[in-house]
Amino acid sequence: MIRSSALSLSLLAAALATVPAPASAQWQWRDASGRMVYSDIPPPPSITRIVKSPGQLSGEYRPVEAPPANAESAPARPAPVKAAAAPAPTAEEAFQKRRAERLEAAAKEAQKEAEANERTTRCAQLRNYAQGLQQGVRTGVMTADGSVQYLGGEERQAEILKTNANIEKNCG
């Protein structure tokens, strides 16, 4: 008998340990889409469907302004102008926004990397071309009619100067 009661007590303790404790949120309210929100900070002023707040029992309430005791004796005051506050984004909307920003940043980074790789390749080709010109490798350029015109001494020097200026401008 003692053994079975000790066993049942240990099983009960194990079962209670697996039951999650309720959240200790001080504030509860329903957002614009009707979903329940739990938080330790008060809701934004645009929220009027507060379910629970510190020092108040659970149950939905809506704050109501009390009308003046005597409507005729109360001075007429203009209605306060409220700026149209954008509704607070839901968790899903905030997630989607962060995700889109991350994807956009990754795309920009990939584009920058591709441009850097292209620039490196272009610069390597220019340096190889300049080296070939300086070593006297036979080089020709395509003319308008599609024939090849090989560079002579002055044309080679002009092409070397042009290539070196291009390297200095784009690869420096």
Image (cartoon, rainbow, N blue to C red):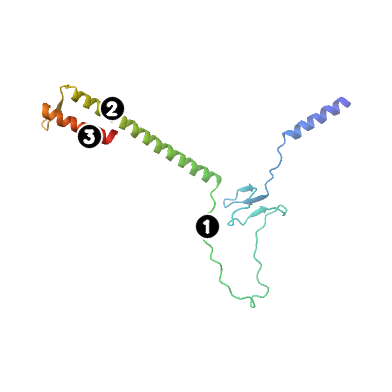
Identify which residue is drawn at 62% across, 48% down: 37
Image-quadrant location for residue 13: top right
Q: Position of residue 94 (x, y in %)?
A: 52, 45
Sort mark 1 into few (<14), some (14-19) or many (20+) by Cα contacts within 10 Å. Answer: few
Of the numbered discs 2 and 3, the one sitting upstream in the chain is: 2
Q: Viewer-nearest of labels 3 and 1?
A: 3
Q: Secondary structure at mark 1?
A: loop
Q: Quadrant of the C terminus?
A: top left
Outermost residue, bottom side: 73
User: Is residue 95 visible in this depiction of the protein?
Assistant: yes
Q: Which mark is residue 124?
A: 2
Sort mark 3 into few (<14), some (14-19) or many (20+) by Cα contacts within 10 Å. Answer: few
The amino acid marked with disc number 2 is: Ala
Identify which residue is drawn at 19% across, 24% down: 134
The amino acid marked with disc number 3 is: Ala
Q: Viewer-nearest of labels 2 and 3?
A: 3
Location of mark 3 (residue) = 165
Location of mark 1 (residue) = 85
